[in-house]
Image: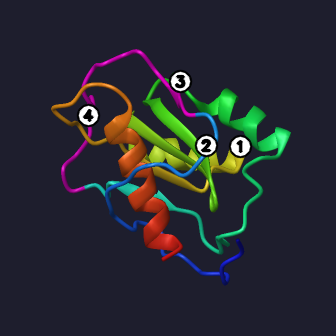
Amino acid sequence: MSHPSRSVILGAAVLAACLSGAGCASSDDSDDAGTKDSAPVSYVAEGLTCDFDRSALSAQDTNERVGGRVEKDFTVRFSRTTDVGIVALVTGDTKKAFDFLNKQYGVAIVARVERDKDPGRVASFAQVQKLVDAVCP
């Protein structure tokens, strides 16, 4: 299903869950180190469309490379291939994560992972879905 193209402003903040495709996660449960409360909780690439081919092998391969990635300033806790492209939920420096993941892998949205009382991936799927819904209503 194709939706109209939408320009998205960097720094859109929303919650989330997931559409389809395999999700990837890190098993590290440490809290955000050095994350400032005043920093945006999500970064969105400009010019996203809502018709990304999430079933393509290249998209699935990229999602596998992004999910669980650990860098000096951030860790990808969960990633998902969606209608807007790959969405990554991170701990650590969200801005540095977006800059790196968008440039290296074309990740569409990077957001700080939200903590939930329910352990597991259910909350992450919901957070990704809300992020995507904000772009593709």
Q: Residues within 10 Å of mark 2 (few under 14, many from 20)?
A: many
Per the rendering, the mark at residue 34 is 4
Query: Mark 1 highlights which residue?
Result: 105
- Tell me the colour scheme of the image: rainbow
Sequence order check, earlier mark of 1 and 3: 3
Sequence order check, earlier mark of 4 and 1: 4
- What is the secondary structure assignment of the residue under circle 2? helix
Q: Residues within 10 Å of mark 1 (few under 14, many from 20)?
A: some
Q: Residues within 10 Å of mark 4 (few under 14, many from 20)?
A: few
Query: Mark 2 highlights which residue?
Result: 101
Disc 2 residue type? Leu
Q: Residues within 10 Å of mark 3 (few under 14, many from 20)?
A: many
Instruction: Report the span colored magenta.
Output: 23-38
Measured as percent of width and height from the top left, residue 5 is found at 67, 81
Q: Residue at x 47, y 23 (%)?
A: 72
Left or right, 76 with reference to 67: left
- What is the secondary structure assignment of the residue under circle 3? loop
Seen from this angle, which residue lies furthest left? 117
Sequence order check, earlier mark of 2 and 4: 4
Disc 1 residue type? Tyr
Query: Mark 3 highlights which residue?
Result: 68
